[in-house]
């Protein structure tokens, strides 16, 4: 079985060079003395799903190259004994994005959504959609200006509401166009 250390050296090479290493480079990375040993290692990694080959035999990264280990849960209430539990690694993209073709990121400026937990400097992942449900946070064009607000539908009346008491609801005068719906939030500390 391929060791985690050997695999992590290949991942580190990929991260540094933005390409997969050659067999010769793998031999050097893991300090093997023969290419036959590298060939066996590569085949074990392919069997484990950690790397793959294209039709021409070139090595390709898999989701494991972009995954972050998932170690279980932590209590946000009273402390309790916890055990580290290694779950399947998952890439953040796989976790946060449902429809890759219609998802994009936006940097948040302004403080109108702070009570919804969206702060200036956050990144929102939004899914391109022209329709939204009551209560969803949307990226919308209102009378030619763009904003991030909560969509409120009351009968035929549609407004965009901030999540900050310092901002009044926005009622479109001429046009309201929904461009996307917020599906995830990213914040760096």
Image: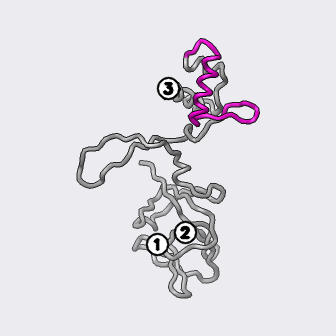
Q: Residues within 10 Å of mark 1 (few under 14, many from 20)?
A: many
Earlier along the polypeptide chain: callout 2 or callout 3? Answer: 3
Badge 3 local density, few (<14 within 10 Å), some, or many (20+)? few
Q: Left or right: 181 with respect to 69? A: right
- Helix, strand or loop at mark 1: loop
Q: How far is disc 3 from disc 1 in space, using C-alphas?
A: 51 Å
Instruction: Please tell me in which quadrant of the rendered image residue 177 appears.
Output: bottom right
Residue 158 percent coordinates (x, y)? 54, 82
Outermost residue to the bottom: 155
Element type at mark 2: strand
Q: Where is mark 2, residue-wise?
A: 138
Residue 53 in magenta stretch: yes
Q: Is residue 165 above or below residue 87?
A: below
Q: Is residue 145 magenta?
A: no
Is there CB contact under 8 Å for labels 2 and 1? no
Query: Which residue occupies 53% across, 61% down?
Result: 183
2, above or below 48, in the image: above
Label 2 environment density (alpha carbons within 10 Å; few <14, some 14–19, many ≥20): many
Look at the image and name its color scheme: one colour
Give the residues in magenta.
31-59
Image coordinates of residue 59 in percent, x first then y, are: 67, 31
Q: Which residue is mark 3?
A: 3
Which residue is farthest right? 56
Q: Nearer the viewer, residue 140 or 28?
A: 28
Determine the residue located farthest toward the top in the rendered image.
Answer: 33
Residue at image coords 30%, 53%: 76
* Residue identifier under label 1: 162
Check disc 3 and report its element: helix, strand or loop: loop
- Among the two numbered marks 3 and 1 on one chain, the one whose residue lies closer to the N terminus: 3
Pick the front one: 36 or 164: 36
């Amino acid at each position: 079985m391929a060791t985690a250390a050997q695999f992590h050296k290949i991942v580190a090479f990929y991260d540094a060079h933005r390409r997969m290493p050659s067999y010769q480079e793998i031999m050097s990375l893991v300090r093997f003395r023969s290419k036959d040993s590298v060939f066996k290692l590569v085949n074990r990694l392919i069997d484990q799903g950690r790397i793959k080959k294209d039709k021409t035999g070139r090595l390709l990264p898999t989701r494991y190259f972009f995954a972050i280990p998932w170690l279980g849960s932590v209590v946000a209430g009273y402390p309790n004994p916890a055990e580290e539990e290694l779950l399947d690694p998952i890439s953040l993209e796989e976790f946060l994005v449902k429809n890759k073709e219609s998802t994009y990121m936006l940097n948040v400026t302004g403080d109108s959504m702070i009570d919804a937990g969206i702060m200036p400097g956050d990144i929102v992942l939004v899914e391109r959609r022209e329709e939204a449900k009551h209560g969803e946070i949307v990226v919308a064009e209102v009378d030619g200006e763009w904003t991030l607000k909560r969509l409120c539908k009351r009968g035929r009346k549609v407004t965009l509401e901030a999540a900050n008491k310092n901002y009044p609801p926005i009622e479109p005068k001429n046009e309201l166009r929904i461009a996307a719906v917020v599906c995830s939030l990213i914040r760096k500390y």
